[in-house]
Image: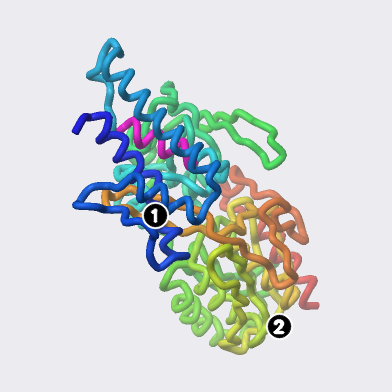
Amino acid sequence: MKKSRLLLLFILWSLFGWFIRQIGHERNTLHEPIIQSGKLNLEGLIASIKNVVNTDKIWLWNKTYERFDTIYTILQSSYYNTDKLNTGKMLNSALKAYVDAIDDPYTIYMDSEQNSWFQEELKWTSDFEGIWAVIGKKDYYIQVDEVIKWSPAFLAWVRMLDRIIMINTWSTKNLDVQQAVKEIRGPKWTKVKLIIERISKDGTKEVIEKEITRDKLIIPSVNGKIITWAKKEIFWYINISIIGEETETLLKNTLTELKSQHIKWIILDLRGNWWGILPISVQIASHFIPKGKLVVSTKYTVFEDEKLLSEGYTDYQNIPMVILVDWLTASAGEIIALALKEQIGAQLIGTQTFGKWSIQTIDEFDDGASIKYTVGKRYTPNGENIDITWAAPDVVIEFNPDAYTNSGIDTQLEKAQQVLTTMIK
């Protein structure tokens, strides 16, 4: 079989794979056999798809894939340096561009190497030194996918979805994720300079220069302590940095320890809480919201919609509470913050949250590549989806990284203590 024919078959399998699975969900069998004698039956494939989609779309798809074959044939026969024709790389680029055209920053295609790095970054291992931000490739630039709370990146005000366009003196336009990670990471106390392009939700672009000192971090999922403010008022301070599988258990243990101190006022710190597991966020909220009250609802295209209710685990409901939030409070962190605000009247202190109320999942392919994509939306108990509007705090105050670095003063925590004092008098 000619190389061009092999290429066409590979493209068809890659780009039609997802679509065929969707057809399979709706039909128990396809009308025409797709595999005949171990070979792809193109006529059978087209005939089967025609049964469930518009014929005009099939014509367009056929023309598009024929063009892939035509371009490959032209380049193979006439391109001046055929050694540069890396078919695998070209196909991966095509798949990435295909998914990027959706224009959803949370929906991306990752080849096997990028997916491997992405999974490793999300493990939160503490055996490396760097700025502690998870990055990926989006279009032509390196995108910040996550920022770890209290990390060097966090304290430098690097944000999710920032575009890193330069690392030190190197442009990131032609860098893959592995090369970018190699450049950004480095020994503790050394510095790296990033040039960042930030696009606000209204489309405004801003170019920012950051010089960040690398560090090594060990950050617990839940940290609780008793704090005294103005030498008289005593509060529980509970910091939840990430919402993982063990977080609710750790929170339960922390609450048990603090309860013995007979303190009934809580500051819940959800700053930098940028992702988490949806059922765990409901369990966490259940420690503070009465049983049976709505925590969050979800809406999907292909799955059944859900209303997730509080289990009302313990006796911490309806106690005075303030919640610290910021521009890195997203996803599961926002679920908890807004459920507590709407259901028990907790006040939000800090800055606007990130505004991520879409739900993503990841499908991995046999070769190790993956696609991370949006499958639904989440809504507050009052029915609000805040992808566009964010969650506005009741009391707005910026975090001052210089004051924190130089003097250990957390300006937002200071304000939270002041506000809680007015609530309990």
- Could you tell which of marks 2 and 1 lies nearer the N-terminus? 1
Residue underneath mark 2 = 318
Compared across the picture, whether 344 is left or right of 114 comes to: right
Q: Which residues are magenta?
A: 88-99
- At which x and y percent is residue 279? 51, 74
Q: Tell me the residue that label 1 is attached to.
A: 122
Q: Which residue appears at 32% of the width and 25% of the height?
A: 72
Which label lies toward us, 2 or 1?
Answer: 1
Q: Amino acid under label 1? A: Leu
Decide whether the magenta segment is chiefly helix, strand or loop: helix
Expressed as whole percent of the image width and height from the top left, the position of residue 122 reads 39, 54
Going by the image, does 120 lie left or right of 145? left
Amino acid on which the number 2 mark rests in the picture = Asn
Classed neighbour count for the residue bearing mark 1: other residues with Cα under 10 Å, few (<14), some (14–19), many (≥20): few
Residue 83, placed above or below residue 233: above
Per the image, is 58 magenta? Answer: no
Find residue 119 and report its horizontal and vertical position in percent.
Answer: 35, 53
**In the depicted structure, whether residue 317 falls above or below residue 144:** below
Residue at 67 percent across and 78 percent down: it is 294
Name the image quarter holding residue 178.
top left
Q: Secondary structure at mark 2?
A: loop
In this rendered view, identify the residue nearer to me: 214 or 208. Answer: 208
User: The N terminus appears in which quarter of the rendering?
Assistant: top left
Residue 233 percent coordinates (x, y): 69, 74
Quadrant occupied by the C terminus: bottom right
Residue at 69 percent across and 61 percent down: it is 385
Q: As drawn, which residue projects farthest toward the top?
A: 80
Location of residue 411 with respect to 214 vertically, above or below:
below
The question of residue 97 being in magenta is answered with: yes
